[in-house]
Image: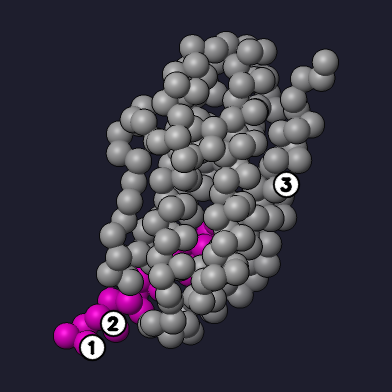
Amino acid sequence: MTRKNLVGTALAVLTAGLVLAGCGSDSTGHDMGSTTGTTSAAAGAPSGGHNDADVAFAQGMIPHHQGALEMAKLVQGRTTNPRLLDLASRIEKAQDPEIKTLTGWLTGWGAQVHTTGMPGMDHGADMPGMSAAELDQLKQAKDADFDRMFLGMMIRHHQGAIDMANTELRQGSNAEAKQLAQQIIDAQQAEITEMQGLLPTG
């Protein structure tokens, strides 16, 4: 039983390393943090080496990322702003692989995987920028109104992810989880700066 668990966890860690390597090579044009050697680091990682904070980070970040993906998918057909369309595409390309990585870790750790459920469900008031009412308003907005609302919501949403990642850096113990947390901070802070520059002035 123990041997089987160790093998399963090792496979999950290997898989996570490969997914992270793919995420690190994403052509976002942003500094995704130090991803060099991610695969080898994950492959050589011990099968254990995680704590409750690592589990909480993965469990919380999966639905949080899914919320960002749901918002990003709303961009098509609601705006013609090429910079916003490009940003939404990059968010999808970066965060979807991270969801797969986090899911693999939780599976390997024998922990429950939390998701948001079907798109459009209430994500709860504790998820910045993602209340059901705000999401409904975003779905009904178009053009400049959509752009302004999307950017404001996504900035708050990204800040929530950065806060969660900073908690992981302070309290987590798993090296790969902390490395991903730093990548999230670097990438999403860069996107916040970009989005603040896209917000209309006046």
Label 1 neighbour load within 10 Å: few <14, some 14-19, many 20+: few
Left or right: where does residue 28 sit relative to residue 6?
right
Is 4 in front, or is 118? 118
Query: Image point 39% across, 82% down: which residue?
Result: 48
Q: CA distance from mark 3 to mark 1?
A: 43 Å
* Figure label count: 3
Magenta span: predominant SS is: helix
Say what amino acid the circle numbered 3 marks. Answer: Ala
Identify the mark nearer the N-term, 3 or 1.
Answer: 1
- The answer to the question of whether label 3 and label 1 lie on touching residues, with beta carbons closer than 8 A, is no
Q: Is residue 163 above or below residue 21?
A: above
Label 2 neighbour load within 10 Å: few <14, some 14-19, many 20+: some
**Which of the two discs, 2 and 3, sits closer to the camera?**
3
Image coords of residue 34 (percent x, y) = 68, 67
Residue 99 at least partly seen: no
The secondary structure type at the circle numbered 1 is helix
Left or right: where does residue 151 sit relative to residue 103?
right
Q: Is residue 37 above or below residue 185?
A: below
Q: Is residue 19 magenta?
A: yes
Q: Is residue 152 above or below residue 10?
A: above
Q: Is residue 86 magenta?
A: no
Say what amino acid the circle numbered 2 marks. Answer: Val
Which mark, by number, is residue 190? Answer: 3
Identify the mark nearer the N-term, 2 or 3.
Answer: 2
Image coords of residue 15 (percent x, y) = 40, 68
Residue placed under numbered mark 1 in the picture: 3
Q: CA distance from mark 1 to mark 2?
A: 6 Å
Image coords of residue 9 (percent x, y) = 32, 76
Say what amino acid the circle numbered 1 marks. Answer: Arg
